[in-house]
Image: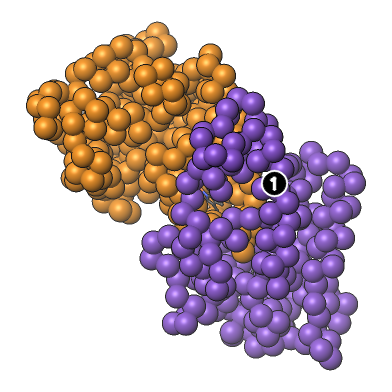
Chain colours: A orange, B purple
């Protein structure tokens, strides 16, 4: 099914630059290496996407996000360089793979999207309902541009969400309960579809949360969704999966959504992030 | 019917977590003092985790839908491989108790209608692009998890292949009755299975289940060619 030739070029690149954990690596190289190691059906299901990885339309979104990040904006006319994503103000290298995390200034565990909203409203002074923070779902939204850029600065870094603060552990553990919580007319939980490798819903191969090599791709958002022709976020994926389960609409930025993302990030621990990714 | 029952159990659950850390005065409770189960319930029902007031197709709100009956609660705690024997026995008996047979016994319906139901995943979505049951009936989505007609290649594999189901098992009344029970409430045979309770949860009517059974069992159905 998978054409080996597709991976020759990224593999060569990879060997030339054999990298220590914690260095930036382009998403297509990270994915090629994971495939070489695991041969997972989920990772290889779309040959077309694999061939397009190097020309991911999300790379435009990343570039637009970079410009936005450094531009003075909002009523306070400041850039986001003063925003602390956990490793100090403006430090982005490897910051996203260590989220969600506890932030002392808010007393909350926050995911990337929630933290970004926090900085845009407090630091830059945007109102909650300003389109800059409110519109979150398309490649052309500021939110997706900024998330894509910040995310891309963690490509190749191993997921490593901190569990030092008791709230981080509490949220991760509640997220596990949410992941397994069966409800609604279909009796579904996330675990129904994501706890075994090689299983399919219709023709889609499902990622398994118990396989970190598969799960790192599953949670590597922002990703360009070919079927949607838009870059999408983790929060958008959570909402979509609740919709598919025929359960209620999850609220972006709620502690429930952040707990779920804490659990799913912990499950990919140690595996390199693919950012931005490309999905079906 | 089912949802009235559900509300009662979940209300009991709600009392439980309020007493384990959540404060009544609307202040954020200490998450670290709560069990993971209590915190998860709190995050959904008290901390705006899910939009609870939206209307559902069954005529209630999302709040009722997010609450669990006893079977869902037990099966949230593990799988058939990890749960204790007592829990699984309880689930099997709850599964059995949920089965309502048609008056005059189970008969096969129309396999062509069953085929449509097996292909359709329409129904019960809420939040955005809500499925509207007044314009189209909900389906059974069997192809999401099962192989059936050998000519259909886009089939899921979460469940076993049901290709040639009737050819392999025959069309005796015993097979018809067994299959009805599995589709109505599969936990009676497979406690904590991934398969939905199409009858017990009100997803498919008795007549629709009879049509799906015909699709599986009728010798003329493409499943058996």
Q: Position of residue B165 (x, y in %)?
A: 73, 71
Q: Nearer the viewer, residue A22 or B159?
A: A22
Query: In the rendered image, which residue does mark 1 sit on?
Result: B15
Q: Position of residue A21 (x, y in %)?
A: 42, 11
Chain under numbered label 1: B
Q: Residue at x 12, y 23 (%)?
A: A78
Q: Nearer the viewer, residue B128 or B186?
A: B128
Q: Residue furthest front?
A: B25
Q: Residue at x 19, y 45 (%)?
A: A131
| Left or right: A48, with A165 as reference point | left
Could you tell me which secondary element the residue under label 1 belongs to?
helix
Q: Residue at x 48, y 37 (%)?
A: A255
Label 1 Cα neighbours within 10 Å, binned few <14 / some 14-19 / many ≥20: few
Q: Position of residue A196 (x, y in %)?
A: 63, 41
Q: Quadrant of the C terminus of chain B?
A: bottom right
**Occupied quadrant, residue A151:** top left
Q: Nearer the viewer, residue B136 or A103?
A: A103
Q: Position of residue B59 (x, y in %)?
A: 55, 73
In the picture shown, does residue B57 fall above or below A176? below
Q: Nearer the viewer, residue A68 or A152?
A: A68
Q: Residue at x 23, y 45 (%)?
A: A129
In the picture shown, does residue B170 fall above or below B155? below
| Left or right: B211, with A207 as reference point | right
């Amino acid at each position: 099914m998978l054409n080996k030739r597709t991976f020759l070029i990224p593999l060569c690149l990879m060997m030339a630059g054999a990298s220590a954990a914690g260095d930036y690596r382009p998403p297509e190289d990270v994915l090629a290496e994971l495939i070489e190691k695991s041969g997972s059906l989920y990772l290889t299901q779309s040959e077309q996407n694999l061939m397009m990885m190097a020309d991911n339309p999300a790379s435009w979104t990343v570039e637009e996000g970079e410009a936005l990040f450094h531009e003075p904006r909002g009523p306070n006319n400041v850039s986001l360089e003063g925003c602390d994503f956990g490793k100090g103000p403006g430090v982005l290298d490897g910051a996203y793979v260590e989220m969600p995390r506890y932030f002392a200034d808010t007393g909350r565990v926050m995911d990337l999207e929630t933290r970004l909203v926090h900085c845009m409203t407090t630091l830059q002074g945007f109102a909650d309902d300003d389109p800059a923070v409110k519109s979150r779902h398309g490649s052309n939204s500021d939110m997706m541009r900024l998330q894509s850029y910040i995310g891309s600065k963690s490509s190749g870094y191993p997921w490593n969400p901190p569990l030092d603060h008791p709230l981080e552990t509490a949220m991760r553990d509640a997220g596990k309960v949410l992941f397994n919580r069966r409800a609604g007319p279909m009796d579904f939980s996330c675990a129904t579809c994501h706890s075994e490798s090689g299983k399919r819903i219709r023709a889609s191969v499902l990622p398994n949360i118990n396989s970190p090599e598969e799960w790192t791709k599953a949670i590597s958002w922002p990703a360009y969704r070919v079927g949607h022709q838009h870059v999408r976020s983790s929060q958008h994926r959570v909402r979509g999966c609740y919709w598919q389960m025929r359960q209620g609409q999850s609220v972006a930025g709620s502690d429930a959504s952040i707990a779920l993302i804490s659990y799913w990030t912990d499950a990919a621990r140690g595996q390199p992030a693919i950012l931005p990714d490309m999905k079906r | 019917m089912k949802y009235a029952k559900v509300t009662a159990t979940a209300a009991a659950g709600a009392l439980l977590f309020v007493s384990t850390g959540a404060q009544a005065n609307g202040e954020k409770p200490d998450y670290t003092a709560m069990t993971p189960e209590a915190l998860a319930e709190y995050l959904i029902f008290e901390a705006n985790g899910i939009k609870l007031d939206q209307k559902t197709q069954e005529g209630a709100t999302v709040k009722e839908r997010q609450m669990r009956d006893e079977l869902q609660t037990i099966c949230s705690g593990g799988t058939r491989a990890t749960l204790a024997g007592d829990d699984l026995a309880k689930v099997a008996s709850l599964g059995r108790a949920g089965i309502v047979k048609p008056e005059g016994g189970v008969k096969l319906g129309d396999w062509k209608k069953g085929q449509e139901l097996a292909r359709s995943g329409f129904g019960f979505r809420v939040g955005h692009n809500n499925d509207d049951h007044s314009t189209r009936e909900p389906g059974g989505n069997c192809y999401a998890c099962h192989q059936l007609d050998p000519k259909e290649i886009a089939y899921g594999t979460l469940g076993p292949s049901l290709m040639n189901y009737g050819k392999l098992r025959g069309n005796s009344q015993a097979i018809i009755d067994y299959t009805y029970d599995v589709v109505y409430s599969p936990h009676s045979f497979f406690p904590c299975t991934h398969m939905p309770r199409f009858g017990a949860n009100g997803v498919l009517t008795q007549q629709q289940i009879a049509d799906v059974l015909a699709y599986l069992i009728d010798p003329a159905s493409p499943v058996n060619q």
